[in-house]
Image (cartoon, rainbow, N blue to C red):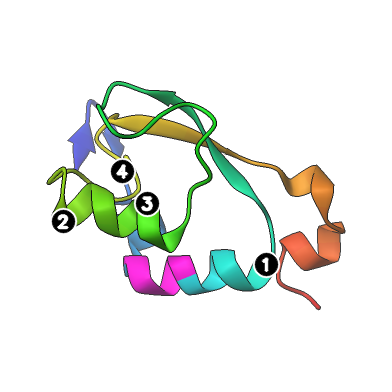
Amino acid sequence: KELGAYSLEYPIWNTPYDELLDDLEASGVRVVVSASNQEGIDVGTPFTRTLYQDAVKKLAIDGFGEEGEFHSIAEVWTVSKEQAMGLV
């Protein structure tokens, strides 16, 4: 996608979502919805593969919220930096 003079990577890092979900789960980093404009995705809800699948199948929105449907925060401070980066 183009945004002014910038070219955006879409989906995130141009990587299939299944691979991103696998990496996220393997990292052990907890991810939580921090903002949402969608019924059924509440602030404080953990971002999991189930939430991703519900977003796509039940709500017909981008499962990672890349169109601004919701935002999340990765609680990387809850694990070691090596674990968060997939180095262990």
**CA separation in Å, label 2 and label 4:** 25 Å
Q: In this figure, which residue is indicated by the disc labeled 2?
A: 57
Which residue is outermost to the left? Answer: 60
Residue at (19%, 37%) from the top-left corner? 2
Residue 82 is left or right of residue 32, and the answer is right
Residue 45 horizontal/vertical position (percent): 50, 38
Q: In this figure, which residue is indicated by the disc labeled 4?
A: 8
Which residue is outermost to the right? Answer: 80
Q: Are marks 2 and 4 in contact (CB under 8 Å)?
A: no
SS at mark 4 in the image: loop
Earlier-in-chain disc, 1 versus 4: 4
Query: Where is 68 relative to 21, above or below?
Result: above
**Disc 2 versus disc 4: nearer the observer:** 2
Q: Which class describes the residues within 10 Å of circle 1: few (<14), some (14-19), or many (20+)?
A: many
Kind of residue indicated by mark 2: Lys
Type of secondary structure dominating the magenta stretch: helix
Task: Write the start and end of the magenta stretch as one range.
Answer: 17-21
SS at mark 2 in the image: helix
Question: Is residue 41 rendered magenta in the image?
Answer: no
Residue 46 horizontal/vertical position (percent): 53, 45
Kind of residue indicated by mark 3: Leu
Q: In this figure, which residue is indicated by the disc labeled 3?
A: 51
Earlier-in-chain disc, 3 versus 1: 1
Question: Is residue 19 rendered magenta in the image?
Answer: yes
**CA separation in Å, label 3 and label 1:** 18 Å
Residue 39 horizontal/vertical position (percent): 25, 27
Residue 49 is left or right of residue 44, and the answer is left
